[in-house]
Amino acid sequence: MTKTIQILWKLFLLSFPFSIHFVLYEKASYRFGNFSPWVTGFLYLPEILLALVCVLWFIQKTKNKEPITLKTSGAGLTLLFLFLLNAGIVTYFYGDIVLYLFFLIRVLEAGIIYLLIRQKIIPHEAFISWLLYGAVLQIMIAYIQTRLNHSVGLTLMGEPVIGPDIANVAKTDLADGSKIIRPYGTFLHPNLLGAYLLTIFFISLPHLKKAALPVWIILLCVGIYLTGSQAAQLTLLLTAGILLMLSFMRKALQKKYFCWGFLGIIAFANLWIYENSAQLAWNYNSIAERLMQNVISMNMFLGQWWGVGVANFTLVMEQFSHIKLLPWEFQPVHNTYFLILNETGIQGLLLLVAIIGYKLHDYWQADLQYLLKDKARILPLFALIIIASFDHLLWTSWLGPILIGMVVAETTRPR
């Protein structure tokens, strides 16, 4: 059975970007005139594969009478429980409890991924290798999509139908009036592909051999560039800057204070933008739309600071908008922290900040060797913290909890 479990786990690591999904719940999906994925309950095919791996692994452990041992922080679990409990209570009174249950399933899946990685279902080197294999596959598909300027036809892998003349497809307008699509891979949006490649980049960085290091760095950077995700590109530069700064520090205490300081800068930047979005002007349409979403988010917070319920932002955002919203403008605010503030309340955001702070504190408690490997192990966590300031995907997509589970497992894995 061990071999079967390992094969299925490797298949999951390769295929979890495949967006093959089924609609299970759609009570309010067509309220805006167009289909809205933000208020729809989906089942993704890789979820079934993950559940199968977990069940077989648990059966094997039970059959062999092997204890499941895993050192976990009681304080961290308590904070997570309080965060989920608060989100459930707020959603019960103000939102859709069924959508909260879908969210809870995603959190459980993140926990399963964390557990399977920490239990070393396969050697860690093999885990990294299969993540890289999946990334290469996505980069290849993305490159072909850019060359063809439409989808490849891999619908069985969940590739969406994309093209320059298809509505709601992310594309770039050229000066001559033509349009070039941004590649999706097998994801539902290029930004998801960018976040995926970014996370794989920093998870694998400490484990790449010297000869392969420049090759993988170039390949993954090219993939991130192809996606056209400015959030992923900016996060890549900022996180690389963190690594560079840590390289000049020789004492663990210096590194710890630097990371806390950088976290404070991120918090201050988010707060400043949140307070000043109504006064900021930008000619770039996508940025102007995000500033408008920030204003709606601020109005929503001032009107209901205790939260509107998980996945309920788009259902109530028109109540807090000073202008009439078009159907495609019903989107979550493109900032994970602002969205969590609105959906779980100020108490939910404070619990999230406490969780992040605790994870950083716990990381720096351990003894560190002053090698690239040790310095780089904190980078995936910072990459997620940064990119959360530019998009909502860590909260609204099924991919987000998977990446979080992998990153937390990597940063807490025994050295």
Image: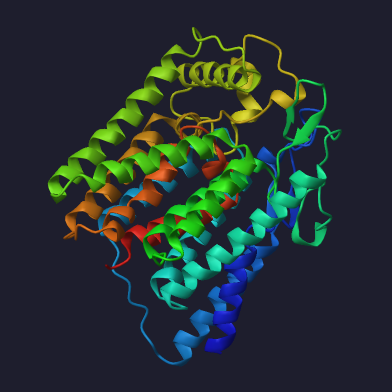
Q: Is residue 396 left or right of residue 407?
A: right
Pick the quarter of the image with the N terminus: bottom right
Q: Seen from this angle, which residue lies furthest right?
A: 165
Q: Which residue is drawn at the image coordinates 37% and 78% (left, top)?
A: 68
Q: Which residue is drawn at the image coordinates 59% and 41% (left, top)?
A: 225
For residue 318, above or below residue 392: above
Residue 272 spot, x, y in % from top left: 38, 18
Q: Is residue 258 left or right of residue 67?
A: left
Pick the quarter of the image with the C terminus: bottom left
Q: How many marks?
A: 0
- Type of colouring: rainbow
The reply to whether residue 97 is in sight is no
Residue 209 spot, x, y in % from top left: 40, 67
The reply to whether residue 146 is in sight is yes
Residue 267 spot, x, y in % from top left: 34, 29
Q: Quadrant of residue 332?
A: top right
Q: Seen from this angle, which residue lies furthest top?
A: 279
Q: Quadrant of residue 376?
A: bottom left
Q: Which residue is drawn at the image coordinates 52% and 56% (left, top)?
A: 402
Q: Is residue 101 left or right of residue 413?
A: right
Residue 31 spot, x, y in % from top left: 77, 30
Q: Nearer the viewer, residue 67 or 265?
A: 265
Q: Seen from this angle, which residue lies furthest bottom?
A: 64
Q: Nearer the viewer, residue 323 or 167?
A: 167
Q: Quadrant of residue 77?
A: bottom left
Q: Is residue 335 left or right of residue 357?
A: right
For residue 395, above or below residue 338: below
For residue 119, above or below residue 41: below
